[in-house]
Image: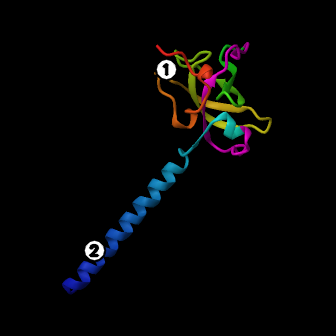
Amino acid sequence: MKAKHQRLVLALFAVAGIAGAGVLGASALRDEAAYFRTPVEIKGGKAVVGEPMRLGGMVASGSIARQSDGLTIRFVATDGKASVPVEYTGIVPDLFGEESGMVADGRMRADGTFVADRILAKHDERYMPPQMGDMPKNMKAPKA
């Protein structure tokens, strides 16, 4: 085989390898990809029932209700303009509490409740995601 043909075959194998790696990477990320939504976006109709997403906001004051099974909690996530009821079964982080920031991974149910698979508590009260920057000052977590 001539050197020119060898380089062509090598180049084709390289392109096929790169394309294969791209397909594998995209398929791996497909299950992990989730849009970040705020309560106002969910109330505005941007959330599809069953679509994986992240809900970010503050835990409304007085909204945490622990269920009798000891693991399920219900609370309301708010961004100061809209509120979304959230249900989570599991152990919540230590920093999770009323009037604190949180991000929940999960899906919307048809009844309008966000069912969380995972809850992340915001660890720094001074940080606010850019999407929530125009939230009223009285809804933000107190600064340390």
Is any part of residue 90 visible from this angle?
A: no
Where residue 72 appears, as percent x and y from the top left, is 68, 20
Horizontal side of 80 relative to 15 (left or right) equals right
Q: Residue at x 71, y 31 (%)?
A: 82
Q: Residue at x 67, y 20 (%)?
A: 60
Give the class, few, some or many, for how many residues have Cα within 10 Å of label 2's Cα (few <14, many ≥20): few
For this orientation, the residue located farthest to the bottom is 2
Q: Amino acid at mark 2?
A: Leu
Q: Residue at x 51, y 24 (%)?
A: 122
Q: Amino acid at mark 1?
A: Glu
Give above or below for 39 relative to 125: below
Asked if the stretch drawn in magenta spans residue 48, the answer is: yes
Q: Are marks 2 and 1 in contact (CB under 8 Å)?
A: no
Q: Which residue is mark 1?
A: 125
- What stretch of residues is rendered in magenta? 43-68
Where residue 95 appears, as percent x and y from the top left, is 52, 16
Q: Which residue is mark 2?
A: 10
Asked if the stretch drawn in magenta spans residue 8, the answer is: no
Horizontal side of 12 relative to 33 (left or right) equals left
* Viewer-closest of 14 and 144: 144
Where residue 13 appears, as percent x and y from the top left, is 33, 71
Which SS does the magenta portion mostly show?
Answer: loop
* Label 2 element class: helix
* Viewer-closest of 25 and 95: 95
